[in-house]
Image (cartoon, grey):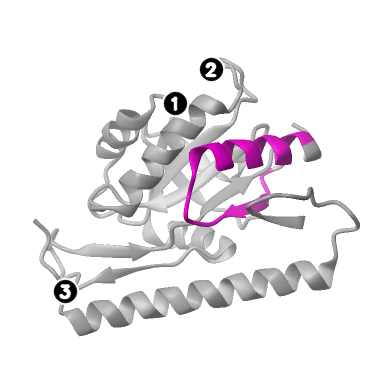
Amino acid sequence: MSKLAPPIRTTLLLMIIALASLAGGYWLSQYLQTTGSGGRIPEGLEATVLDPPRSLTPFTLQDHNGKPFTEQSLLGHWSFLFFGYTHCPDVCPIVLQVMQVAWQQIPHAKDDPAAPRLYFISVDPDRDTPALLKQYVQYFDPAFIGVTGQADEIDKLTNRIGVLYGFEDKQPGSEDYQVNHSAQIILIDPQGRMRAVISPPHDPATIARNFTTIRDFYGD
């Protein structure tokens, strides 16, 4: 089992991430208010839609089959991005279980290159090898794809879309630590742009319904 961090330090780190998440949410709401949508945001959603969408910074990672995964890999289909790690004791398996159910409610053909995809992007590359990620994500659904890479390349993506994470008591050479991280699901449109943020609590039917509404509104 992972060693527990001192309560004060753990609580402080969680508070920092929570406050930063609130600040990010406030910034996002202000961004939407100041840019205006021109009537281009569908109503009745339980998700935060960006209009205009936000372009991504170029990055170079790899998927669980060892193939390159870059911003170009997100073109031509809708993508769900979730950031976590395989040793996560709670948030990650819960979210992936939710997406497992949601996936069954989202109409798509398995062999369609334009079908939506879910990418589980590890923020713990020291422990999460491609082989481990593949075993982990495909336990929930064979269509799910694990992604990993160098920490600085991961940060190019997380910094751009506002995903936060931090290590608890990580010591050089140790594999006994936990990672605090954001629990948002990021929706990327077929042009490879950040289109929406789906914040917790997550519900499969709501995610499926919101995604279908967004996809129908903005197109494939």
Question: Which span is picked out in magenta?
Answer: 192-216
Q: Which quadrant of the view contains residue 101?
A: top left
**Do the residues bearing badges 2 and 1 touch, measured as CB atoms within 8 Å?**
yes
Q: In this view, does 168 lie to the left or right of 91?
A: left
Mark 3: which amino acid? Ala
Whole-percent x, y for residue 2 in the image: 12, 60
Q: How far apart are marks 2 and 3 (CA)?
A: 43 Å
- The residue lying at 79 percent from left, 71 percent from top is 33
Label 2 packing within 10 angstroms: few (<14), some (14-19), many (20+): few
- The residue lying at 49 percent from left, 44 percent from top is 203
Lower sequence index among marks 1 and 3: 3
Mark 2: which amino acid? Lys
Q: Mark 2 — residue?
A: 110
Is residue 82 one of those drawn in magenta? no
Mark 1: which amino acid? Ala
- What element does badge 3 sit on? loop
- What element does badge 1 sit on? loop
- The residue lying at 32 percent from left, 78 percent from top is 13
Q: Up-down: is 150 above or below 68?
A: below
Lower sequence index among marks 2 and 3: 3
Lower sequence index among marks 2 and 1: 2
Q: Which quadrant of the view contains residue 161?
A: bottom right
The reply to whether residue 58 is visible in this rendering is: yes
- The residue lying at 50 percent from left, 61 percent from top is 158
> What is the total number of numbered labels drawn onto the structure image?
3
The reply to whether residue 75 is visible in this rendering is: no
* In the foreground, 218 or 111: 218
Q: Up-down: is 22 above or below 103?
A: below
